[in-house]
Image (cartoon, rainbow, N blue to C red):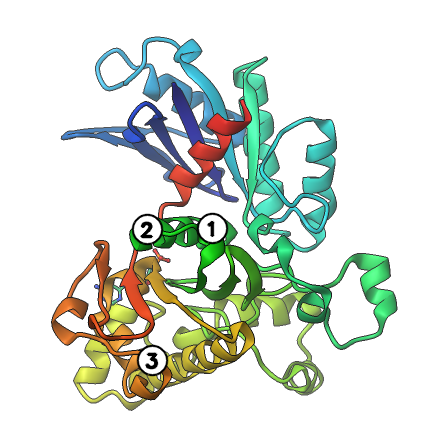
């Protein structure tokens, strides 16, 4: 069975085809700069690289190009679109209406549309991708896999904000959490590695990349996560501020005359380690600059690490007992320095890292010592595979 997985952004579309017999990736590709000058499709499988440069005015056109590329006589991997059994879509926000992956019908599209209010950049793009696929392959089943779904098991005392209750009633304003497909994959894979059932484990899943979040997973279900109403809450990220005193925002709006939209832009795109360092949102650049003595790069890294520790400590207490801590994401998978800094001197709390084992990048590896009470590991996340699995299960 072959499944196409689509992750549609406002100006980009990533895709992969999985052969679910062995969960292998047959092909992957990216359409960039949709609606912008210089647009192109790049597709890869094995050593084959296929690039198509042409004007791509909208998502309908992008999806048509993907369908052509995967069926291309020279560079494609299928002969007919009939070989694709279904299409799985990554969708950002399902609010509190959709707590599981689901076959897309009008009602599901209405929910995605309703929660554009909390995902103004992603939900419209996700919908465009879905509708473009419906047009390009009529009758083919489309499945939505929500970034928010895994976190729907959080209890109200964790997901409610300390503001008047009427705003929850009126707008469903609350914490939702994101990266859910990644946190779910990490939970399942950690349990497999531990040779246990997810319900027999308490795990802290730590997804550190350009966007970063932690989840406290109790007996296989999400109890708490660091992102909130939107992916802005929680950790300091590449360009996002994470938590801050809300008064800092109203102060800046008053003093600088920022509108709400400008404030949103500042907190999402100009803050985080980029805003602090003034150098880059990429941790590789910051580590390099810090090594050369750049104090603000070092400050950005120290702030990022402190915030991670604060959440780790908080989740250890919230969960009460922790069996495993699992690192993923571009930074979590590839930076032994970050992992070592976050978990140094925690023997008292049952965490002992083996420096040799920790010296690994981008592969599955237990990095704690054999006598560490908590097992710490690195697991490269695989959200696309999770989407493909859900899609297969639903059809
Ligand atoms: P992601 O958003 O998960 O793709 O992660 C992207 C981020 O991971 C990049 O912005 C880098 O900051 C970070 N990253 C990737 N590779 C490394 C590495 N070898 N060392 C440090 N950071 C890395």
Give the distance between the C-alpha atoms of the residues marked 1 and 2, in whole angstroms. 17 Å
| Picture layout, residue 346 above or below residue 167 | below
Crowding near the residue tagged with mark 1, few <14, some 14–19, many ≥20 C-alpha atoms within 10 Å: many
Name the side, left or right, on which 371 lies relative to 237. Answer: left
Q: In the picture, residue 38 is in which quadrant?
A: top left
Q: Nearer the viewer, residue 393 or 288?
A: 393
Q: Tell me the residue that label 2 is attached to.
A: 195
Q: Nearer the viewer, residue 252 or 107?
A: 107
**What is the number of callouts on the image?**
3
Residue visible at 52% across and 80% down in the picture: 317
| Picture layout, residue 64 above or below residue 293 | above
Q: In the picture, residue 302 is in which quadrant?
A: bottom left
Q: Secondary structure at mark 3?
A: loop
User: N-terminal of the two: label 1 or label 3?
Assistant: 1
Q: In the picture, residue 82 is in which quadrant?
A: top left
Q: Nearer the viewer, residue 99 or 228?
A: 99
In percent of width and height, residue 290 lies at: 23, 83
Q: Are marks 1 and 3 in contact (CB under 8 Å)?
A: no
Task: Give the farthest residue toward the left.
Answer: 356
Q: Secondary structure at mark 1?
A: helix
């Amino acid at each position: 069975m072959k499944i196409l997985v689509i992750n549609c952004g406002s100006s980009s579309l990533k895709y992969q085809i999985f052969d679910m017999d062995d969960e292998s990736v047959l092909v992957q590709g990216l359409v960039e700069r949709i609606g912008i000058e210089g647009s192109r499709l790049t597709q890869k499988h094995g050593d084959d690289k296929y690039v198509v440069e042409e004007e791509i005015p909208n998502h309908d056109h992008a999806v048509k190009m993907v369908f052509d590329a995967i069926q291309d006589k020279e560079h494609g991997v299928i002969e007919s679109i009939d070989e694709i059994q279904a299409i799985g879509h990554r969708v950002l926000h399902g609010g509190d209406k959709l707590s599981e992956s689901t076959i897309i019908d009008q009602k599901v599209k209405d929910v995605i549309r309703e929660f554009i209010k909390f995902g103004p950049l992603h939900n419209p793009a996700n919908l465009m991708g879905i509708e473009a696929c419906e047009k390009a392959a009529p009758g083919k089943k489309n499945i939505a896999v929500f970034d928010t779904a895994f976190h729907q098991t959080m209890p109200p005392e964790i997901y409610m904000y300390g503001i008047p209750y009427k705003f929850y009633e009126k707008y469903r304003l609350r914490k939702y959490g994101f990266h859910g497909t990644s946190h779910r994959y990490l939970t399942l894979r950690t349990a497999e590695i531990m040779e246990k059932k997810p319900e027999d484990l308490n795990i802290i899943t730590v997804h550190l990349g350009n966007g970063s979040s932690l989840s406290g997973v109790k007996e296989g279900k999400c109890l708490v996560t660091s992102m909130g109403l939107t992916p802005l809450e929680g950790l300091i990220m590449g360009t996002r501020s994470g938590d801050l005193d809300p008064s800092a925002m109203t102060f800046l709006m008053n003093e600088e005359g920022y509108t709400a939209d400008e404030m949103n832009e500042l907190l999402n795109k100009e803050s985080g380690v980029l805003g602090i360092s003034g150098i880059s949102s990429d941790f590789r650049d910051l580590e390099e600059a810090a090594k050369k003595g750049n104090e603000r790069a070092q400050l950005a890294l120290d702030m990022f690490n402190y915030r991670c520790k604060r959440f780790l400590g908080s989740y250890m207490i919230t969960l009460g007992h922790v069996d495993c801590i699992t690192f993923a994401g571009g930074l979590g998978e590839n930076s032994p320095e970050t992992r070592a800094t976050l978990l140094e001197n925690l023997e008292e709390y049952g965490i002992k890292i083996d420096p040799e084992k920790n010296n690994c990048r981008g592969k599955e590896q237990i990095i704690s010592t054999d006598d560490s009470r908590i097992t710490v590991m690195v697991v490269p996340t695989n959200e696309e595979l999770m989407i493909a699995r859900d899609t297969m299960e639903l059809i």
